[in-house]
Protein backbone atom coordinates (compact mmCIF):
# COMPACT_ATOMS: atom_id res chain seq x y z
CA UNK A 1 0.00 0.00 0.00
CA UNK A 2 1.39 3.39 -0.98
CA UNK A 3 1.94 5.78 1.95
CA UNK A 4 0.31 8.65 0.04
CA UNK A 5 -2.90 6.62 -0.38
CA UNK A 6 -3.08 6.18 3.39
CA UNK A 7 -2.35 9.84 4.14
CA UNK A 8 -5.09 11.02 1.78
CA UNK A 9 -7.68 8.51 2.99
CA UNK A 10 -7.67 8.70 6.79
CA UNK A 11 -11.35 7.67 6.91
CA UNK A 12 -10.25 4.12 6.20
CA UNK A 13 -7.57 4.15 8.90
CA UNK A 14 -9.03 2.24 11.86
CA UNK A 15 -7.93 0.80 15.22
CA UNK A 16 -7.79 -2.90 16.02
CA UNK A 17 -7.53 -4.17 19.58
CA UNK A 18 -5.52 -7.18 20.75
CA UNK A 19 -6.62 -8.45 24.18
CA UNK A 20 -4.15 -8.86 27.03
CA UNK A 21 -5.04 -11.44 29.70
CA UNK A 22 -4.09 -11.46 33.37
CA UNK A 23 -2.56 -14.42 35.19
CA UNK A 24 -4.37 -13.71 38.45
CA UNK A 25 -7.90 -13.24 37.11
CA UNK A 26 -7.71 -15.25 33.83
CA UNK A 27 -9.64 -12.54 32.02
CA UNK A 28 -9.00 -9.54 29.77
CA UNK A 29 -7.22 -6.79 31.67
CA UNK A 30 -6.10 -4.62 28.74
CA UNK A 31 -6.02 -4.07 24.99
CA UNK A 32 -3.18 -3.00 22.75
CA UNK A 33 -4.19 -0.52 20.04
CA UNK A 34 -2.99 -1.52 16.56
CA UNK A 35 -3.39 0.35 13.27
CA UNK A 36 -5.22 -1.10 10.26
CA UNK A 37 -6.22 0.22 6.84
CA UNK A 38 -9.49 -0.93 5.28
CA UNK A 39 -9.20 -2.26 1.72
CA UNK A 40 -11.57 -4.15 -0.57
CA UNK A 41 -9.74 -7.36 0.38
CA UNK A 42 -10.00 -6.62 4.09
CA UNK A 43 -7.99 -4.71 6.72
CA UNK A 44 -4.19 -4.66 6.43
CA UNK A 45 -1.61 -3.82 9.08
CA UNK A 46 -0.12 -0.33 9.20
CA UNK A 47 3.03 -1.65 10.85
CA UNK A 48 5.16 -1.19 7.68
CA UNK A 49 3.88 2.39 7.37
CA UNK A 50 4.99 3.35 10.88
CA UNK A 51 8.35 1.57 10.50
CA UNK A 52 9.18 3.36 7.23
CA UNK A 53 11.76 6.03 8.16
CA UNK A 54 11.41 7.67 4.75
CA UNK A 55 7.95 8.88 5.68
CA UNK A 56 8.21 12.23 7.52
CA UNK A 57 7.55 12.11 11.26
CA UNK A 58 4.64 14.53 11.11
CA UNK A 59 2.79 12.32 8.59
CA UNK A 60 3.28 9.20 10.70
CA UNK A 61 2.14 11.19 13.73
CA UNK A 62 -1.03 12.31 11.93
CA UNK A 63 -1.99 8.74 11.10
CA UNK A 64 -1.13 7.57 14.60
CA UNK A 65 -3.30 10.22 16.25
CA UNK A 66 -6.17 9.41 13.89
CA UNK A 67 -6.05 5.77 14.99
CA UNK A 68 -5.84 6.74 18.67
CA UNK A 69 -8.74 9.17 18.54
CA UNK A 70 -10.97 6.49 17.01
CA UNK A 71 -9.70 3.98 19.57
CA UNK A 72 -10.31 6.35 22.50
CA UNK A 73 -13.83 7.02 21.31
CA UNK A 74 -14.58 3.29 21.48
CA UNK A 75 -12.59 2.69 24.67
CA UNK A 76 -14.61 5.24 26.65
CA UNK A 77 -17.21 2.48 27.06
CA UNK A 78 -14.76 0.06 28.73
CA UNK A 79 -14.66 -0.79 32.45
CA UNK A 80 -12.49 1.71 34.29
CA UNK A 81 -9.96 -0.97 35.31
CA UNK A 82 -9.15 -1.99 31.73
CA UNK A 83 -5.88 -0.61 30.40
CA UNK A 84 -5.21 0.63 26.87
CA UNK A 85 -1.69 0.09 25.51
CA UNK A 86 -0.41 2.66 23.02
CA UNK A 87 2.57 1.46 21.01
CA UNK A 88 4.71 4.52 20.40
CA UNK A 89 8.08 4.78 18.67
CA UNK A 90 10.52 6.75 20.87
CA UNK A 91 11.58 8.89 17.92
CA UNK A 92 7.96 9.76 17.13
CA UNK A 93 7.31 10.56 20.78
CA UNK A 94 10.25 12.94 20.93
CA UNK A 95 9.24 14.80 17.78
CA UNK A 96 5.74 15.55 19.16
CA UNK A 97 6.80 18.99 20.41
CA UNK A 98 3.22 20.29 20.46
CA UNK A 99 2.21 17.49 22.85
CA UNK A 100 -0.63 16.41 20.59
CA UNK A 101 -0.68 12.91 22.11
CA UNK A 102 -0.94 14.21 25.67
CA UNK A 103 -3.63 16.70 24.66
CA UNK A 104 -5.65 13.89 23.06
CA UNK A 105 -5.35 11.73 26.18
CA UNK A 106 -6.43 14.55 28.49
CA UNK A 107 -9.37 15.50 26.22
CA UNK A 108 -10.93 12.08 26.80
CA UNK A 109 -10.70 12.32 30.58
CA UNK A 110 -14.16 13.89 30.82
CA UNK A 111 -15.53 11.28 28.38
CA UNK A 112 -14.72 8.41 30.71
CA UNK A 113 -11.22 7.32 29.65
CA UNK A 114 -8.82 8.21 32.43
CA UNK A 115 -5.08 8.89 31.89
CA UNK A 116 -4.40 6.14 34.46
CA UNK A 117 -5.89 3.65 31.98
CA UNK A 118 -3.32 4.55 29.33
CA UNK A 119 -0.09 2.56 29.07
CA UNK A 120 2.53 4.21 26.88
CA UNK A 121 4.49 1.34 25.35
CA UNK A 122 7.92 2.56 24.22
CA UNK A 123 10.90 0.89 22.59
CA UNK A 124 13.79 3.15 23.58
CA UNK A 125 16.14 1.56 21.05
CA UNK A 126 14.77 4.10 18.55
CA UNK A 127 15.64 7.15 20.66
CA UNK A 128 18.59 8.04 18.37
CA UNK A 129 20.89 8.89 21.24
CA UNK A 130 18.39 11.18 22.98
CA UNK A 131 17.94 8.86 25.94
CA UNK A 132 18.08 11.62 28.54
CA UNK A 133 15.40 13.60 26.71
CA UNK A 134 13.27 10.45 26.52
CA UNK A 135 13.66 9.86 30.26
CA UNK A 136 12.49 13.37 31.09
CA UNK A 137 9.55 13.09 28.70
CA UNK A 138 8.37 9.76 30.09
CA UNK A 139 8.61 11.05 33.65
CA UNK A 140 6.55 14.06 32.57
CA UNK A 141 3.83 11.78 31.17
CA UNK A 142 3.79 9.82 34.41
CA UNK A 143 2.89 12.97 36.37
CA UNK A 144 -0.52 12.74 34.67
CA UNK A 145 -1.02 9.15 35.86
CA UNK A 146 -0.08 7.59 32.52
CA UNK A 147 1.70 4.25 32.90
CA UNK A 148 4.94 3.38 31.11
CA UNK A 149 5.84 0.03 29.52
CA UNK A 150 9.24 -0.73 28.01
CA UNK A 151 8.89 -2.82 24.85
CA UNK A 152 11.11 -5.35 23.04
CA UNK A 153 12.57 -6.96 26.14
CA UNK A 154 13.84 -10.54 26.18
CA UNK A 155 16.41 -10.42 23.38
CA UNK A 156 19.19 -8.88 25.47
CA UNK A 157 19.85 -7.24 28.81
CA UNK A 158 22.20 -4.49 27.63
CA UNK A 159 20.21 -1.58 29.04
CA UNK A 160 18.91 -2.99 32.31
CA UNK A 161 20.67 -0.22 34.21
CA UNK A 162 18.61 2.41 32.37
CA UNK A 163 15.40 0.52 32.93
CA UNK A 164 16.06 0.33 36.66
CA UNK A 165 16.53 4.11 36.69
CA UNK A 166 13.30 4.77 34.78
CA UNK A 167 11.30 2.26 36.86
CA UNK A 168 8.56 1.51 34.29
CA UNK A 169 5.25 0.01 35.36
CA UNK A 170 5.45 -2.88 32.87
CA UNK A 171 8.25 -4.73 31.06
CA UNK A 172 7.06 -6.28 27.81
CA UNK A 173 8.90 -9.48 26.83
CA UNK A 174 8.81 -10.73 23.24
CA UNK A 175 8.55 -14.54 22.99
CA UNK A 176 9.09 -14.53 19.23
CA UNK A 177 12.55 -15.93 19.87
CA UNK A 178 11.04 -18.95 21.59
CA UNK A 179 10.24 -21.05 18.54
CA UNK A 180 11.16 -24.52 19.75
CA UNK A 181 10.11 -26.53 22.80
CA UNK A 182 13.30 -25.64 24.68
CA UNK A 183 14.81 -22.22 25.34
CA UNK A 184 18.58 -21.87 25.28
CA UNK A 185 20.45 -21.27 28.55
CA UNK A 186 21.33 -17.67 27.59
CA UNK A 187 17.69 -16.79 26.98
CA UNK A 188 16.67 -18.45 30.24
CA UNK A 189 19.26 -16.39 32.10
CA UNK A 190 18.03 -13.15 30.50
CA UNK A 191 14.47 -13.99 31.53
CA UNK A 192 15.59 -14.71 35.08
CA UNK A 193 17.43 -11.38 35.20
CA UNK A 194 14.34 -9.56 33.89
CA UNK A 195 12.05 -11.24 36.41
CA UNK A 196 14.39 -10.29 39.27
CA UNK A 197 14.65 -6.71 37.98
CA UNK A 198 10.87 -6.45 37.59
CA UNK A 199 10.40 -7.64 41.17
CA UNK A 200 12.95 -5.17 42.52
CA UNK A 201 11.44 -2.13 40.78
CA UNK A 202 7.81 -3.18 41.23
CA UNK A 203 7.09 -3.73 37.53
CA UNK A 204 4.83 -6.38 35.99
CA UNK A 205 6.02 -8.69 33.20
CA UNK A 206 3.90 -8.88 30.05
CA UNK A 207 4.74 -11.68 27.60
CA UNK A 208 3.71 -11.04 24.00
CA UNK A 209 3.71 -13.12 20.79
CA UNK A 210 2.45 -16.20 22.61
CA UNK A 211 1.58 -18.63 19.81
CA UNK A 212 1.65 -22.02 21.54
CA UNK A 213 0.66 -23.67 24.81
CA UNK A 214 4.35 -24.19 25.54
CA UNK A 215 5.01 -20.44 25.29
CA UNK A 216 2.11 -19.71 27.63
CA UNK A 217 3.51 -22.21 30.15
CA UNK A 218 6.94 -20.61 29.74
CA UNK A 219 5.49 -17.14 30.42
CA UNK A 220 3.60 -18.40 33.49
CA UNK A 221 6.67 -20.20 34.84
CA UNK A 222 8.86 -17.12 34.39
CA UNK A 223 6.72 -14.73 36.39
CA UNK A 224 4.48 -13.28 33.68
CA UNK A 225 1.50 -11.41 35.05
CA UNK A 226 0.05 -10.50 31.64
CA UNK A 227 -0.19 -12.55 28.41
CA UNK A 228 -0.78 -11.56 24.80
CA UNK A 229 -0.63 -13.43 21.51
CA UNK A 230 -2.48 -15.31 18.78
CA UNK A 231 -2.67 -18.46 20.94
CA UNK A 232 -5.04 -16.48 23.15
CA UNK A 233 -6.76 -14.03 20.82
CA UNK A 234 -5.79 -12.23 17.62
CA UNK A 235 -6.45 -8.50 17.13
CA UNK A 236 -10.13 -7.61 16.76
CA UNK A 237 -12.05 -4.58 15.53
CA UNK A 238 -14.29 -4.70 18.61
CA UNK A 239 -13.93 -5.42 22.32
CA UNK A 240 -14.63 -8.90 23.70
CA UNK A 241 -16.33 -10.35 26.75
CA UNK A 242 -13.71 -10.04 29.50
CA UNK A 243 -14.21 -13.61 30.66
CA UNK A 244 -14.10 -15.18 27.21
CA UNK A 245 -11.12 -17.43 28.07
CA UNK A 246 -11.58 -17.64 31.82
CA UNK A 247 -12.39 -21.37 32.03
CA UNK A 248 -9.77 -22.33 29.44
CA UNK A 249 -7.01 -20.35 31.13
CA UNK A 250 -8.04 -21.65 34.53
CA UNK A 251 -7.73 -25.23 33.24
CA UNK A 252 -4.37 -24.60 31.55
CA UNK A 253 -3.07 -22.88 34.66
CA UNK A 254 -4.16 -25.89 36.73
CA UNK A 255 -2.13 -28.15 34.42
CA UNK A 256 0.89 -25.83 34.82
CA UNK A 257 0.51 -26.00 38.60
CA UNK A 258 0.39 -29.81 38.59
CA UNK A 259 3.49 -29.94 36.39
CA UNK A 260 5.45 -27.57 38.62
CA UNK A 261 4.34 -29.40 41.78
CA UNK A 262 5.68 -32.63 40.30
CA UNK A 263 9.04 -30.98 39.57
CA UNK A 264 9.25 -29.54 43.08
CA UNK A 265 8.42 -32.93 44.58
CA UNK A 266 11.19 -34.45 42.46
CA UNK A 267 13.62 -31.87 43.83
CA UNK A 268 12.67 -32.64 47.43
CA UNK A 269 12.94 -36.35 46.70
CA UNK A 270 16.43 -35.87 45.27
CA UNK A 271 17.49 -33.77 48.24
CA UNK A 272 16.27 -36.45 50.65
CA UNK A 273 18.04 -39.14 48.62
CA UNK A 274 21.30 -37.23 48.78
CA UNK A 275 20.82 -36.48 52.46
CA UNK A 276 20.41 -40.17 53.21
CA UNK A 277 23.28 -41.39 51.03
CA UNK A 278 25.79 -38.80 52.19
CA UNK A 279 24.85 -39.07 55.86
CA UNK A 280 25.10 -42.84 55.66
CA UNK A 281 28.55 -42.58 54.08
CA UNK A 282 29.71 -40.08 56.70
CA UNK A 283 28.39 -42.24 59.54
CA UNK A 284 30.29 -45.25 58.27
CA UNK A 285 33.47 -43.19 58.02
CA UNK A 286 33.25 -40.93 61.07
CA UNK A 287 36.77 -41.85 62.13
CA UNK A 288 38.24 -40.34 58.98
CA UNK A 289 39.68 -36.96 59.99
CA UNK A 290 41.48 -35.88 56.84
CA UNK A 291 39.08 -33.97 54.57
CA UNK A 292 40.78 -35.11 51.34
CA UNK A 293 40.38 -38.74 52.37
CA UNK A 294 36.76 -38.11 53.35
CA UNK A 295 35.97 -36.46 50.00
CA UNK A 296 37.56 -39.40 48.19
CA UNK A 297 35.24 -41.79 50.01
CA UNK A 298 32.15 -39.65 49.25
CA UNK A 299 33.23 -39.29 45.59
CA UNK A 300 33.34 -43.07 45.23
CA UNK A 301 29.80 -43.30 46.63
CA UNK A 302 28.43 -40.57 44.34
CA UNK A 303 30.58 -41.25 41.29
CA UNK A 304 27.64 -41.38 38.84
CA UNK A 305 26.08 -38.15 40.17
CA UNK A 306 28.77 -35.63 41.09
CA UNK A 307 31.75 -34.03 39.37
CA UNK A 308 33.09 -31.70 42.08
CA UNK A 309 33.09 -31.54 45.88
CA UNK A 310 34.78 -29.55 48.65
CA UNK A 311 34.37 -28.46 52.28
CA UNK A 312 34.03 -24.88 53.59
CA UNK A 313 33.64 -23.31 56.99
CA UNK A 314 30.64 -21.17 57.91
CA UNK A 315 32.34 -18.00 56.62
CA UNK A 316 32.94 -19.50 53.18
CA UNK A 317 36.67 -20.28 53.50
CA UNK A 318 37.54 -23.54 51.79
CA UNK A 319 39.11 -26.04 54.20
CA UNK A 320 39.72 -28.82 51.69
CA UNK A 321 41.03 -29.03 48.15
CA UNK A 322 38.56 -29.54 45.33
CA UNK A 323 37.93 -33.09 44.28
CA UNK A 324 37.18 -32.72 40.56
CA UNK A 325 36.11 -35.45 38.15
CA UNK A 326 37.78 -35.27 34.75
CA UNK A 327 36.43 -37.94 32.43
CA UNK A 328 36.45 -41.02 34.69
CA UNK A 329 39.18 -39.91 37.06
CA UNK A 330 38.89 -37.88 40.28
CA UNK A 331 41.72 -35.38 40.70
CA UNK A 332 42.76 -33.31 43.75
CA UNK A 333 43.01 -29.54 43.19
CA UNK A 334 45.04 -28.19 46.09
CA UNK A 335 45.00 -24.60 44.80
CA UNK A 336 41.42 -24.11 46.03
CA UNK A 337 42.33 -24.41 49.73
CA UNK A 338 41.60 -21.14 51.64
CA UNK A 339 39.59 -19.59 48.80
CA UNK A 340 36.52 -17.73 50.02
CA UNK A 341 33.04 -18.15 48.50
CA UNK A 342 30.96 -15.86 50.72
CA UNK A 343 30.55 -13.44 47.79
CA UNK A 344 28.36 -15.93 45.94
CA UNK A 345 24.61 -15.12 45.89
CA UNK A 346 22.69 -16.80 48.72
CA UNK A 347 25.86 -18.41 50.16
CA UNK A 348 25.61 -17.01 53.69
CA UNK A 349 21.81 -17.24 53.65
CA UNK A 350 22.05 -20.96 52.86
CA UNK A 351 24.69 -21.49 55.56
CA UNK A 352 22.40 -20.00 58.20
CA UNK A 353 19.45 -22.00 56.87
CA UNK A 354 21.41 -25.27 57.07
CA UNK A 355 22.70 -24.45 60.51
CA UNK A 356 19.22 -23.71 61.85
CA UNK A 357 17.37 -26.54 60.12
CA UNK A 358 20.25 -29.07 60.26
CA UNK A 359 19.33 -30.26 56.76
CA UNK A 360 20.95 -30.18 53.35
CA UNK A 361 19.97 -27.79 50.55
CA UNK A 362 19.65 -28.45 46.82
CA UNK A 363 20.31 -25.27 44.81
CA UNK A 364 18.42 -24.01 41.81
CA UNK A 365 19.90 -24.65 38.37
CA UNK A 366 22.73 -22.39 37.24
CA UNK A 367 25.61 -22.38 34.77
CA UNK A 368 28.94 -23.40 36.29
CA UNK A 369 31.62 -20.72 35.82
CA UNK A 370 34.39 -23.18 34.95
CA UNK A 371 32.61 -25.83 32.87
CA UNK A 372 29.79 -23.68 31.45
CA UNK A 373 27.34 -26.54 32.06
CA UNK A 374 23.97 -26.25 33.77
CA UNK A 375 24.32 -27.80 37.24
CA UNK A 376 22.90 -27.89 40.75
CA UNK A 377 24.78 -27.95 44.05
CA UNK A 378 23.88 -30.02 47.09
CA UNK A 379 25.30 -28.75 50.40
CA UNK A 380 25.13 -30.39 53.79
CA UNK A 381 26.34 -29.48 57.30
CA UNK A 382 29.15 -31.78 58.53
CA UNK A 383 28.99 -30.25 61.99
CA UNK A 384 28.06 -26.89 63.52
CA UNK A 385 30.77 -25.01 61.61
CA UNK A 386 31.80 -26.90 58.46
CA UNK A 387 29.81 -27.71 55.33
CA UNK A 388 30.13 -30.15 52.44
CA UNK A 389 29.38 -28.94 48.89
CA UNK A 390 28.69 -31.38 46.05
CA UNK A 391 28.21 -30.20 42.45
CA UNK A 392 25.90 -32.49 40.46
CA UNK A 393 26.70 -33.17 36.81
CA UNK A 394 24.44 -31.96 34.01
CA UNK A 395 24.28 -35.49 32.55
CA UNK A 396 22.87 -36.84 35.82
CA UNK A 397 20.35 -34.00 36.12
CA UNK A 398 19.26 -34.47 32.51
CA UNK A 399 18.25 -38.05 33.27
CA UNK A 400 16.11 -36.98 36.22
CA UNK A 401 12.67 -35.74 35.20
CA UNK A 402 12.10 -32.07 35.94
CA UNK A 403 15.65 -31.29 37.07
CA UNK A 404 17.18 -29.99 33.82
Image (cartoon, grey):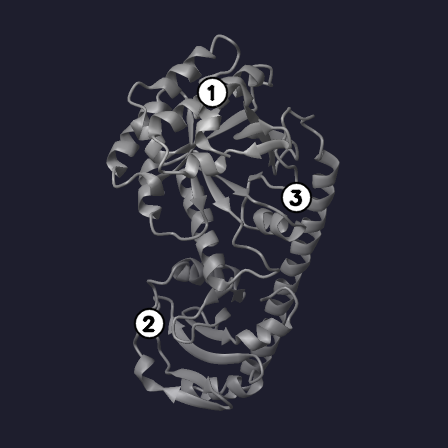
| Rendered image quadrant of residue 74 | top right
Q: Which residue matches tag 3? A: 231
Give the label on residue 66, or none.
1
Q: Position of residue 184 (x, y in %)?
A: 51, 63
Element class at badge 2: loop
Task: Please tell me whether residue 218 is drawn above or below residue 4 in the rendered image.
Answer: below
Between the C-alphas of marks 1 and 2, the distance is: 65 Å
Give the residue pinned by disc 2: 317
Which mark is on residue 230?
A: none
Residue 378 appears in the rendering = no
Q: Earlier in the sequence, mark 1 or mark 2?
A: 1
Residue 69 place in picture, x, y as percent: 49, 17
Most foreground residue, 334 or 13: 13
Q: Residue at x 49, y 69 (%)?
A: 374
| Disc with the residue nearer the chain's start (2 vs 3) | 3
* Mark before the other along the chain sequence, 1 or 3: 1
Q: Residue furthest top?
A: 110
Residue 41 position, x and y percent, is 64, 32
Secondary structure state at the residue bearing disc 1: helix
Pointer 2 with pointer 3, Cβ within 8 A: no
Q: Decide if residue 198 is in sight here.
A: yes
Q: Residue at x 47, y 33 (%)?
A: 2
Given residues 242 and 123, the one toward you in this image is: 123
Amino acid sequence: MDALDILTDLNHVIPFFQPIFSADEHRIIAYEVLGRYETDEGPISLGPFFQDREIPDEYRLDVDLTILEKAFCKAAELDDDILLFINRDAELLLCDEEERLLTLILNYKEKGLQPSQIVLEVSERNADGRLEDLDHLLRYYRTYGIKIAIDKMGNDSSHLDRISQLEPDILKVDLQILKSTAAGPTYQNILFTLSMLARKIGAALLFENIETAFQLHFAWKNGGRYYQGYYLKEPQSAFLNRGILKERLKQECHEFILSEKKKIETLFSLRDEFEHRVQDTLSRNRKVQDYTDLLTIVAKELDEMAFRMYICDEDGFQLSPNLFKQKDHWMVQLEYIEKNWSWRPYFLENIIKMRNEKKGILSDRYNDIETGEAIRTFCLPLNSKNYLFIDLSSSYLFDREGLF
